[in-house]
Amino acid sequence: MDNEVYSPTTEPEAKRPRRLPLGCTLRHLRGWRLPVNPPQTIFSLVAVVCEELVEECYDCSGLYFFEFISCSTFLLSLLILYVYCTDLYESLGEDKVQKL
């Protein structure tokens, strides 16, 4: 009598990708994004800090615009790093990430 009914029905679990500490993976951050995005985040944070060091200005409209742009860049580049380096990429799906 053959026991084919009781043979394994699931596929073996695939290897999980190598992860950096704190659950970060660089698997989706390849190509030009890897060398560009982390320095962009650091430079935009430095720009925000430098803007906050200005104590006096006479015509502050340019400074306020610079503050808005540098803060927006910092927050958006953090969001991109978070999406591409965590499990959020898989949970959203590649097509939704590309639309974002």
Image: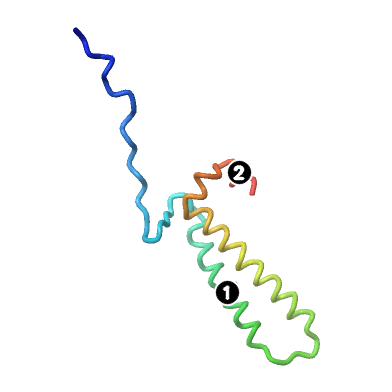
Query: In front here: 9 or 45?
Result: 9
Q: Which mark is residue 96?
A: 2
Residue 72, picture quadrant: bottom right
- Relative image position of residue 1 (x, y in whole percent): 19, 7
Left or right placement of residue 100 versus residue 87 in this view: right
Secondary structure, mark 2, is: helix
Q: Are marks 2 and 1 in contact (CB under 8 Å)?
A: no
Left or right placement of residue 72 versus residue 92 in this view: right
Residue 68 to residue 82: above or below: below
Residue 23, picture quadrant: bottom left
Amino acid type, mark 1: Leu
Q: Which mark is residue 75?
A: none
Query: What residue is rendered at 62% in x and 62% in y?
Result: 76
- Relative image position of residue 80 (x, y in whole percent): 56, 57
Q: Which residue is mark 1?
A: 45
Secondary structure, mark 1, is: helix
Query: What residue is rendered at 37% in x and 61% in y?
Result: 21
Q: Residues within 10 Å of mark 1 (few under 14, many from 20)?
A: some
Amino acid type, mark 2: Lys
- Relative image position of residue 97 (x, y in whole percent): 59, 47
Query: What residue is rendered at 33% in x and 36% in y?
Result: 13
Q: Earlier in the sequence, mark 2 or mark 1?
A: 1
Residue 2 to residue 94: above or below: above
Residue 23 to residue 56: above or below: above
> Cα distance, mark 2 to mark 1?
27 Å
Q: Residues within 10 Å of mark 2 (few under 14, many from 20)?
A: few
Total labels: the figure holds 2
Query: In front here: 7 or 30?
Result: 7
